[in-house]
Image (cartoon, helix red, strand yellow):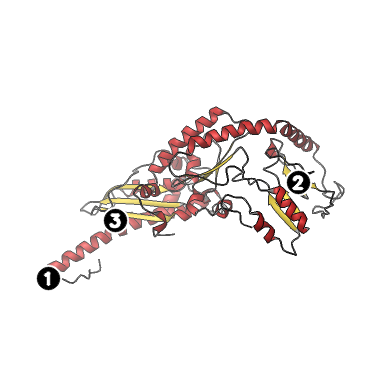
Amino acid sequence: MDPEPNGLVDLEKFRAAIRPDTIVASIMMVNNEIGVIQPIAEMGEICRDKGVIFHCDAVQAAGKVEIDLQTLKVDLLTVTAHKVYGPKGIGALYIRRKPRVRIEAQIHGGGHERGMRSGTLPTHQIVGMGEAFRIAKEEMVSENARIRVLRDRLWNGLKDMEEVHLNGDLEHRIPGNLNISFNFVEGESLIMAIKDVAVSSGSACTSASLEPSFVLRALGLSDELAHSSIRMTIGRFSTEEEIDFTIDLLKNKIAKLRELSPLWEMHKEGVDLSTVQWAAH
Amino acid sequence: MAYSEKVIDHYENPRNVGSFSKDDQDVGTGMVGAPACGDVMKLQIKVNDAGIIEDARFKTYGCGSAIASSSLVTEWIKGKTLDQAAGIKNTHIAEELALPPVKIHCSILAEDAIKAAIADYQSKHGQQAAAGAAEAAGDHSTKPRAA
């Protein structure tokens, strides 16, 4: 189902989308591109009320938002180690016992994990994941506070630039995410310009399919704003120096790329780009 | 995205960035692409009386390959006649810049931009030539002759 323009799912629309034959509802607790946090607690109540199994993809949420499965009415939850500074190649699926959720094995063989998923368990990966989550639990509150300050510093350094748009709700968002469209500058050219900083873009040019980000399109963003978007995330090892460096670099490079851009030129001349007839290819 | 050295060079040091006045008689302006596609190129040519492109300018909204393709063509078309410039093929551009398959469309757009700029220049001069011929023939009809 489609989200609202701020990226959040409307609870009434969610309730209405559940049909008599609906078996499972599956929601990303936190979206990877725009970092917005869905109202999982309320959705869980709705699903329990309607007898629908509720699955949450918490890959981008674990270690960043509070998840208490004693109170959240979530039946199935997926997490991964590598988003919490753990090793790549291991994740976990939580399956609720009370009330019981029964699932069928998809991978058969030696009967590991009580027949649920066959395949020799990678002990080193499991230990790595466990330790990563243990540290995340200890440090989450203080880390979030530190990261939020850095993220806000970055946003404040950029938001007064002309034609800069934040994608997704700022309040219901994990502390470390920013997704910004710098209008009239294409995303991939900007990534190239700021090569000292690792970021990603919703631009079609960065995808093999040449399609722009479906997440940004679902927010109702125009194609050109989707093409002009940059995702920046801040984490455990980010520093204030890096934030300040990035702000200066972005301002400098955006100015340079806007000088190169015919769309910026037209905007400055007062042309309404939505009225232009493009010689589409 | 692994860029060739030439793409990086054109991107870091783009040639002939800027604009001529669209209304100048000796200027042809081609604007191709669409923001919805993430690629818009504006190419302008300044043509002298001998029909030679003596100067060119570009502005591009698009990825590194798109910027490099349009920068490259401004270099290539200078000193060429309109016919010679119209003969530049996207395959030459793609080869020069070593564009990967997923970026070939950038070179196609650059080829289209050249043709659009030439067409614009010719439409300005086609009308002028027809109007001049019509006056000389004492024909005050406003229908322009085919150029």
| Spatial CA span between label 1 and label 2 | 89 Å
**What residue is at 84 percent from the left and 50 percent from the top?**
A116
- Image quadrant in which the N terminus of chain A is located: bottom right
The residue identified by callout 3 is B82
- Secondary element at image label 2: loop
Which circle marks residue A104 in the picture?
A: none
Picture disc at residue B138: 1
Q: Nearer the viewer, residue A22 or B135?
A: A22
Q: Earlier in the sequence, mark 1 or mark 3?
A: 3
Task: State how far apart marks 1 and 3 are (Cα).
Answer: 31 Å
- Where residue B142 appears, as percent x and y from the top left, is 20, 70
In the rendered image, residue B126, in percent from the top left (x then y), is placed at 24, 63
Q: Amino acid at mark 3?
A: Leu
Which three-letter amino acid code belongs to the residue tagged 1?
Gly
Mark nearest the camera among 1 and 3 is: 1
List x then y, in percent, for residue B49: 20, 53
> Viewed as shown, does residue A215 lie left or right of A69?
left
The residue indicated by pointer 2 is: A72
